[in-house]
Amino acid sequence: NDLDQLAAVAADAAEYTQIIEKLLAFLMAAHINPSMMKYQSVIQKALGFIKANFTDPDISLNVVADAVNLSPSHFSTIFSQSLGQTFIDFLTECRLQHAKELLAGTDDKLSAIAMDIGYNDPNYFSYLFKKREGQTPKEFEEHTAERDESRGCEIPRQIVFEGEALVVFRRFTPPNRF
């Protein structure tokens, strides 16, 4: 009976922890559009490609679509429907999170940081940073001691829960390139 099974699980701390982790993973994944589950491997491959290349100024939706063997239009649709944000929003988030780490952890000039994260124009980088963060990169740099550590961009990973593939988000913090 279900009550006896529940009592047995509660008595075993390791099994209880494992079931809670699976349940949390399942609940965290629930916000992914279920109709997009068939594209999990494509999305995973695209996210891996973005993770490895987001600092490349030439990365684009077309480049990533080509890497996963889809048309740009189809890739754009499944990316945004699966993750709830556009490709460019995701790419920008990854770049700006890495910029925050560089601003907090180095004395590099703003122009060098812009180039390091994939923007050839430091003015455009500053514009995007202010638009997204509500302050200029310089202001952010001046207040880093008061801020929490940069959180990184979310990179989904696949988990299997009772035979069903799910996506669970984990934080990706770009590696230091020093």
Image (cartoon, rainbow, N blue to C red):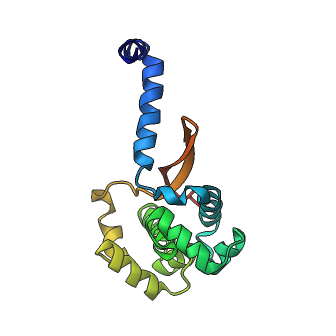
Q: Would residue 137 be found to the left or right of residue 95 on screen?
A: left
- Which part of the image, by quadrant, shows the C terminus? bottom right
Percent coordinates x, y for residue 16 in the rendering: 42, 22
Is residue 98 something that shows in the picture? no
Percent coordinates x, y for residue 102 in the rendering: 48, 65
Q: Relative to 80, is 157 above or below?
A: above
Percent coordinates x, y for residue 154 in the rendering: 47, 57
Q: Nearer the viewer, residue 37 or 143?
A: 37
Q: Residue at x 48, y 84 (%)?
A: 122
Q: Would residue 100 be found to the left or right of residue 73 on screen?
A: left
Q: Nearer the viewer, residue 1 or 77?
A: 1
Q: Relative to 171, is 16 above or below?
A: above
Residue lying at the far front of the rendered structure: 1
Q: Nearer the viewer, residue 17 or 130?
A: 17
Q: Nearer the viewer, residue 21 or 95?
A: 21
Q: Residue at x 53, y 77 (%)?
A: 112
- Which part of the image, by quadrant, shows the N terminus? top left
